[in-house]
Amino acid sequence: MYMAARRTPTGYDQRYRNTAGQMYVYGNVVPKPEQEPERRQVRRPKKKVSRQVQRNRKKALRMSPGYVVFLSAAAILALIICVNYVKLQSRMTGYSKNISALQGQLANMKEENNTKYNAIMDSVNLEEIRERAQENLGMVYATSEQVIEYQRPSADYVKQYENIPEDGVLAQSDKK
């Protein structure tokens, strides 16, 4: 014999007999019954509390004037800090937008500058300049007799204030 289900004389379980007047609904959503059973509320008896405990509880709920002033000052300080933080955040957002705009302008200026530089470099014809210099201005290339080689001093460059000596030595250090 099965222990889980009791059989009635007609052969139906108890749960089917209770729902015999309701319609069967196909699908996976079960409608809520029209009447829900009442829920039981467990009432616990209140414990009696001594007068001293009641006085301590009331005293804990009261706030002294000093405590109220302290809480007010703390709340005002927190409000001031929050307002300054929001202002700082908005200023930072404005600065970042300004930086982005300036970076865009810089990129446009660089592109424009490179375009103009390339246009200028393309317009310069070195062969034309050489011809004009030789024909109009009478310039000629230097001959091997005009080239003087010299020993380079320790500096990277030389400023010529006088003629280069024939031996090619410009300066010598005292150290040998």
Image (cartoon, grey):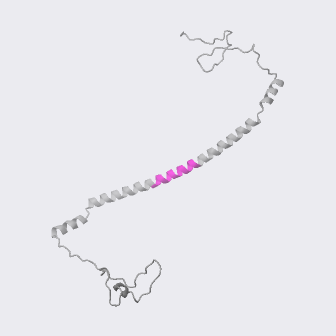
Location of residue 126 by image quarter:
top right
Residue depicted at 21% across the width and 65% down the height = 59
Residue 141, compared with residue 67, is above or below; it is above
Was residue 83 drawn as part of the magenta stretch in this picture? no
Quarter occupied by the N terminus: bottom left
Depth check: 78 or 11 in front?
11
- Relative depth, front residue between 145 and 83: 145
Main secondary structure type of the part rendered in magenta: helix
- View extreme (front): residue: 1
Residue at 44% across / 53% down in the picture?
A: 85
Give percent across and percent down for residue 131. Answer: 82, 27
Residue at left 37%, top 56%?
78
Can residue 91 be found in the magenta stretch? yes
Q: Nearer the viewer, residue 87 or 142?
A: 142
The part of the chain drawn in magenta is 86-100
Q: In the figure, is residue 46 to the left or right of 137?
A: left
> Which quadrant holds the C terminus?
top right
Of 6 and 134, nearer the camera is 6
Relative image position of residue 158 (x, y in whole percent): 63, 19
